[in-house]
Amino acid sequence: MIIIALIEFLKKHLRLVIWICAILLALLVVGDFFLVDKEHAHTKPEHWLGFWSGFGFIACLLIIFVSKWYGHLGIMKREDYYGDE
């Protein structure tokens, strides 16, 4: 399967993947500075360099951590959950 080979490749070259993602994030922040019109921003933080990139990143982290917390409250069960009966 092609997808399995891709996943294995990415696992073997994890440092390269992390560097590529960091470079892409930096390019997005630079693109935000040069390409996004901030003339009609509604709030002061919208004028800051990379505000929406940082906002999206923090929102994504918040979604991940809240989902994990919610899952550990009782939604997630052990693998042998049905074997206990």
Image (cartoon, rainbow, N blue to C red):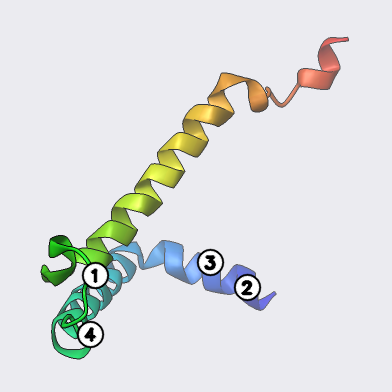
Pick whichever, 71 or 17, lies toward us.
71
Return the disc, 1 or 4, that comes first in the chain's sequence: 1
Q: CA distance from mark 4 to mark 2?
A: 35 Å
Marks 3, 1: nearer the viewer: 1
Q: Which class describes the residues within 10 Å of circle 4: few (<14), some (14-19), or many (20+)?
A: few
The reply to whether callout 2 and callout 1 are in contact (CB within 8 Å) is: no
Q: Quadrant of residue 31?
A: bottom left
Which residue position holds label 3? 7
Q: Amino acid at mark 1?
A: Trp
Q: At label 3, which amino acid type do we have?
A: Ile
Q: Which residue is mark 4?
A: 36
Residue position for label 1:
19
* 48 is higher (above) or lower (below) than 67: below
In the rendered image, the quadrant that contains the N terminus is bottom right
* 60 lies above or below 48: above
Query: Residue placed at 63% from the left, 20% from the top?
Result: 74
Residue at position x 20%, y 86% from top? 37
Q: Are marks 3 and 2 in contact (CB under 8 Å)?
A: yes
Q: Residues within 10 Å of mark 3 (few under 14, many from 20)?
A: few
Q: Is disc 4 placed on a helix, strand or loop?
A: loop
